[in-house]
Amino acid sequence: MRAKTKDVAIGDTRFQIGKMEVEYACWVLNLFMATEARQMMNAKPNSNGTPAPEPPPQEQTREITEEQAGNIVASGWVMVGADLPTESYRQIQSACLRATSMYLEDGSPMPLKMADGRWTASGKRFADDLKTVNQLIIESLKFNLSPFFLEDALNAPPQTTAAGRPSIASR
């Protein structure tokens, strides 16, 4: 069973990264995969006009490490950022920050943002801290999306409902 939270230290501040709403995380994951697919379809041919060669087949039994899965997600965020409308980008950022809390001096976690997207009293100190906020967004994406790559969900056989239709849970 996967942990429901992950602790991250940035500078002298400790944060708790929590889970995003699963439907939202699925949307973000699908954006990542669609962006990668578009980039593969739009790959430029070699300078001599021939298509770029296919990469060598990878051994199917090779497992991805947690660090590699995190790197896939972090680079996916960079690729998606170039293609997304600003409003969608901001929605993803806000979802990541709503799932993130800062530990107070007494050890209790305090959310950085409220459900409506406004900064909490504790979170306001980070409202202008580009480096910390960017790192928290990436950490939240990694925590929420990396399990998809670790669990090899792309290669898992689809589950079906009693009626024989693909189950949403299998995606």
Image (cartoon, grey):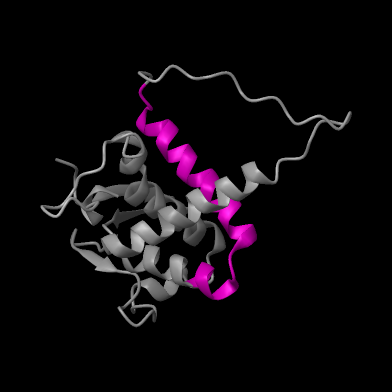
Residue at the farthest left position = 162
| Residue 167 spot, x, y in % from top left | 22, 53
Taking the image as shown, residue 56 lies to the left or right of residue 12, namely: right
Main SS of residues in magenta: helix
State how many labels appear. Answer: 0
Q: Where does residue 8 sit, x and y in percent of width and height?
A: 34, 48
Which of the 4 image quarters holds residue 110?
bottom left
Residue closest to the far right: 48
Left or right, 16 with respect to 68, comes to left
- Residue 91 visible? The answer is yes
Q: Is residue 136 visible?
A: no
Magenta span includes 51:
no
Q: Which is more toward the observer, 109 or 149?
A: 149
Where, quadrant-wise, is the N terminus in this rendering?
top left
Residue 39: x and y in percent read 64, 46
Residue placed at 64% from the left, 25% from the top? 54
Q: Residue at x 28, y 48 (%)?
A: 7
**Which residue shows up at 27% across the image and 60% down it?**
22
Front-most of 119 and 76? 76
Image vertical order of residue 156 relative to residue 112, above or below: above
Residue at image coords 38%, 19%: 62
Work out whether residue 70 or residue 11 is closer to the camera in this orientation and state it. 70
Report the front residue among 90 and 136: 90
- The span shown in magenta is 63-90
Note whether 89 is above or below 67 in the view shown. Answer: below
